[in-house]
Image (cartoon, helix red, strand yellow):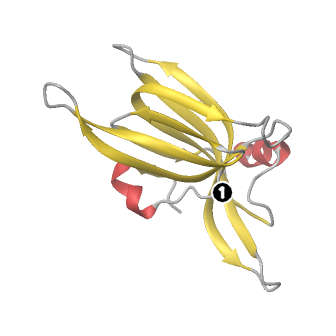
Amino acid sequence: MKRTWNDTDFDEMSWHDNAVHGLRLVEGEYGCGDIVLDLDHILEWLPSETGGFQFRIAPAELTFHDASSLRVSLDYAAASATLSPFSIHQIRFEPMSYVGGAQGRRWTIEVNWPKGEVTFEAPRFTQVLTGSATLSECQHLSAEQRRQLRDA
């Protein structure tokens, strides 16, 4: 099973309904840094005999490197929601050029619950599984499942 992806794999990847448990900022050089999302990555959606789905899920870190211009908008208040992991609808980017000819990407992470989005600029990403995969009836892992899968 593949455990590491990068921007060359973007067209093959989907983050739909991936739960994000944490967002970490790592300071870098020249005012940029890394944006790290601690998420439950859904590797496969598997039709079940009951007509629904089961999900092959593994904990992962999705890191956007040399990022800048971060904006985060998550509206838990409008949904009268308790604090829990937010869920990604999709991740998309548009290419951009900087003065001097450098190339980059403007990223948008659309959040489907609660309503919101995360936007920033970054030239590349990597994603690494941080634990084993498991089969689940839910689209996210509990804190206990995440600990067990990381220790496995």
Q: Which residue is located at x 52 percent, y 28 percent?
A: 71
Q: Is residue 19 left or right of residue 78?
A: left
Q: Which residue is located at x 14 percent, y 31 percent?
A: 101
Q: Position of residue 25 (x, y in %)?
A: 55, 23
Foreground residue, 34 or 80? 80
Most distant residue in the front direction: 78
Q: Which residue is located at x 51 percent, y 30 percent?
A: 35
Crowd tier of the residue under label 1, counting other residues whose Cα lies within 10 Å: few below 14, some 14–19, many 20 or above:
some
Q: Which residue is located at x 82 percent, y 36 percent?
A: 83
User: Which element type, helix, strand or loop, lies under badge 1?
Assistant: loop
Q: Position of residue 146 (x, y in %)?
A: 76, 45
Q: Quadrant of residue 28?
A: top left
User: Given the image, on which type of amino acid does mark 1 rest?
Assistant: Asp
Q: Position of residue 42 (x, y in %)?
A: 63, 59
Location of residue 81 with respect to 58 vertically, above or below: above
Q: Position of residue 125 (x, y in %)?
A: 41, 41
Which residue is identified by label 1?
17
Q: Count the marks.
A: 1
Most distant residue in the left direction: 100
Q: Quadrant of residue 53?
A: bottom right
Location of residue 98 with respect to 44 vertically, above or below: above
Foreground residue, 90 or 48? 90
Q: Is residue 130 left or right of residue 1?
A: right
Q: Is residue 9 left or right of residue 110?
A: left
